[in-house]
């Protein structure tokens, strides 16, 4: 089906102009003023913004974690993402310690294959780096198109690897043109503080926050940057929350190192006062935890200084009954929070409308940089001739209220209940197919395609 989008204000990471877009065969064919072409469908985008489809490179769908599964599966999660203007997500495969990466890939393919509504890819989380795992890295990159490897410096006893494994993995990933993403917090310090708080009889969600002070993140971020610098491996710090971690990245730049950093929408907008709401604070129990207002100021500045390149979500939803698993012990509350549907609208409303970031920066951090860093640009992440026609038509003026009553995520509360936002996703195209229109999803599960990614060394 061909589509002509007329008269929209097209915003990319670098441009801002009014034109028409003609789409055929899943890609953008022409862009120009007053295009004279016949199309199967015409969309009038006068007075609307036209953005590239959002890319959320940090989501956890149908993921086994802390004794349960995240509550959005590949169908509900990618559909909710589309409603919010995110056309592609990158999810995480978790290797089981003692098992191969291949076995983990097959397990995740079993849950995701034919179930995605939107496009997707995987990062491979290496939780057990050994001589066998080492042999699988090249194949993951070159055969499977999985070019980024997640590491956890925390979740001791479950997912955490030590620095020796990190060094070995970095060496191998660098050799084959990949990238390492890291959950950079000091797992031993956190483990110590969890035990200390529980031994003192402190079990409420507030103590989740107090068990992961800023120093745990600052220290691990600096250590990770040092190891990446030493091995020369490209590194990407996920879900950065605080001034101390940002300073670790800033320090790395002083020796001419480039470390990529991602923050998430919740760390820009929410703060740790939410943990004072007794057990209701469990809704925001995530790792790292929410921080202080001064950290929000630092993160916005980090985005504008180019030290933070990506705003993601770390979408990892759990229903209230799942959160109740930790009602008597904060360390048993499944960690994570829902946001896959809200990221693009919240970032526009709180970032662009409130003049914290420009329109071009908005597209850069929500669409273009994730595509570049993770090896998909220019197929994804921009509006250009030849790119996939992943397009969001956005009304910058429409106001609406976020609520669990109206969202499409499979979770019975919202971390943003009652938030008034300015700007609404109206129409979403995924590879030229109208996916969202008139508040309805028009594509089915199975439409979403697994996107094989290029070697990172080819796009950054
Ligand atoms: O609390 C979180 N972030 N849950 C998901 C797993 C992770 O650490 O990213
Ligand atoms: Zn994490
Ligand atoms: Zn995560």
Image (cartoon, grey):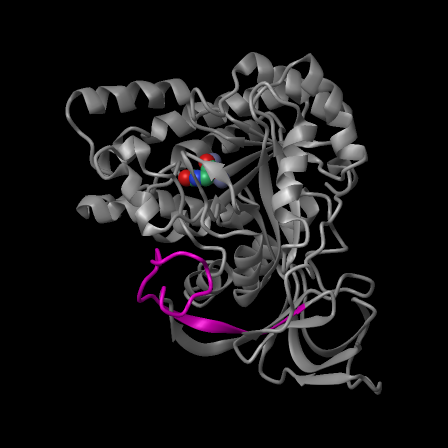
x and y percent of residue 96 in the render?
A: 56, 26
Q: Which residues are magenta?
A: 404-429
Question: Which secondary structure type mostly characterizes the magenta part of the structure?
Answer: loop
Ligand 1 located in image quadrant: top left
Q: Quadrant of residue 58?
A: top right
Q: Is residue 373 visible?
A: yes
Residue that lies at the very extreme toward the front in this rendered image: 110
Q: Quadrant of the N terminus?
A: bottom right
On screen, residue 177 versus residue 16, left or right, reads right
Instruction: Examine the structure image and report whether residue 421 is included in the region drawn in magenta.
Output: yes
Using the image, determine if residue 188 lies above or below residue 291. Answer: above
On screen, residue 185 versus residue 279, left or right, reads right
Using the image, determine if residue 432 lies above or below residue 166. Answer: below
Using the image, determine if residue 37 lies above or below residue 221. Answer: below
x and y percent of residue 360 in the render?
A: 60, 61
On screen, residue 164 versus residue 375, left or right, reads left
Instruction: Examine the structure image and report whether residue 122 is included in the region drawn in magenta.
Output: no
Q: Is residue 284 visible?
A: no
x and y percent of residue 206 in the render?
A: 23, 38
Total marks placed: 0
The residue that appears at 47% across and 60% down in the rendered structure is 347
The residue that appears at 81% across and 34% down in the rendered structure is 142
x and y percent of residue 243 in the render?
A: 39, 37
- Return the residue nearer the eye: 71 or 14: 71
Q: Quadrant of the C terminus?
A: top right
The residue that appears at 42% across and 28% down in the rendered structure is 218
């Amino acid at each position: 089906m061909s589509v002509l989008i007329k008269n929209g204000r097209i915003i990319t990471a670098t441009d801002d102009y009014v034109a028409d877009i003609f789409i055929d065969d899943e890609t953008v064919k022409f862009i120009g003023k007053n295009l004279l072409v016949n199309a199967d469908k015409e969309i009038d985008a006068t007075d609307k913004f036209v953005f590239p489809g959002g890319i959320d490179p940090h989501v956890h769908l149908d993921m086994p974690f802390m004794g349960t599964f995240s509550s959005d599966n590949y169908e509900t999660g990618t559909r909710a993402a589309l409603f919010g203007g995110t056309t592609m997500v990158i999810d995480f495969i978790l290797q089981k310690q003692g098992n191969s990466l291949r076995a983990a890939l097959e397990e995740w393919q079993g849950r995701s294959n034919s179930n995605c509504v939107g496009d997707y890819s995987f990062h491979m989380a290496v939780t057990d780096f050994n001589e066998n795992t080492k042999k699988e890295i090249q194949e993951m990159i070159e055969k499977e198109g999985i070019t980024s490897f997640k590491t956890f410096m925390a979740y001791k006893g479950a997912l955490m690897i030590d620095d020796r494994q990190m060094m070995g993995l970095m060496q191998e990933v660098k050799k084959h043109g990949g990238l390492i993403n890291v959950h950079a917090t000091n797992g031993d310090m956190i483990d110590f503080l969890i035990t200390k708080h529980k031994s003192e009889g402190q079990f409420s969600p507030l103590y989740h926050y107090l068990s992961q002070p800023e120093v745990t993140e600052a220290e691990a971020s600096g250590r990770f940057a040092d190891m990446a610098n030493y091995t020369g491996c490209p590194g990407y710090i996920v879900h950065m929350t605080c001034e101390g971690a940002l300073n670790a990245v800033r320090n790395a730049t002083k020796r001419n190192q480039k470390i990529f950093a991602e923050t998430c929408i919740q760390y820009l907008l929410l703060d740790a006062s939410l943990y004072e709401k007794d057990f209701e604070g469990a809704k925001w129990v995530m790792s790292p935890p929410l921080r202080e207002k001064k950290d929000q100021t630092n993160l916005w500045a980090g985005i504008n200084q180019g030290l933070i390149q990506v705003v993601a979500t770390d979408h990892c939803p759990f229903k209230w009954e799942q959160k109740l698993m930790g009602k008597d012990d904060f360390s048993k509350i499944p960690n994570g929070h829902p946001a896959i549907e809200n990221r693009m609208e919240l970032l526009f409303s709180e970032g662009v409308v409130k003049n914290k970031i420009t329109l071009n920066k908005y597209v850069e951090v929500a669409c273009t940089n994730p595509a570049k860093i993770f090896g998909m640009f220019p197929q994804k992440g921009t509006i250009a001739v030849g790119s996939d026609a992943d397009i969001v038509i956005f009304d910058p003026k429409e106001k609406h209220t976020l609520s669990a009553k109206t969202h499409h995520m499979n979770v019975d509360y919202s971390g943003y209940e009652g938030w008034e936002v300015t700007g609404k996703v109206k129409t979403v195209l995924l590879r030229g197919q109208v996916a969202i229109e008139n508040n309805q999803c028009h594509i089915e599960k199975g439409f979403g395609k697994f996107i094989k990614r290029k070697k990172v060394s080819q796009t950054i």
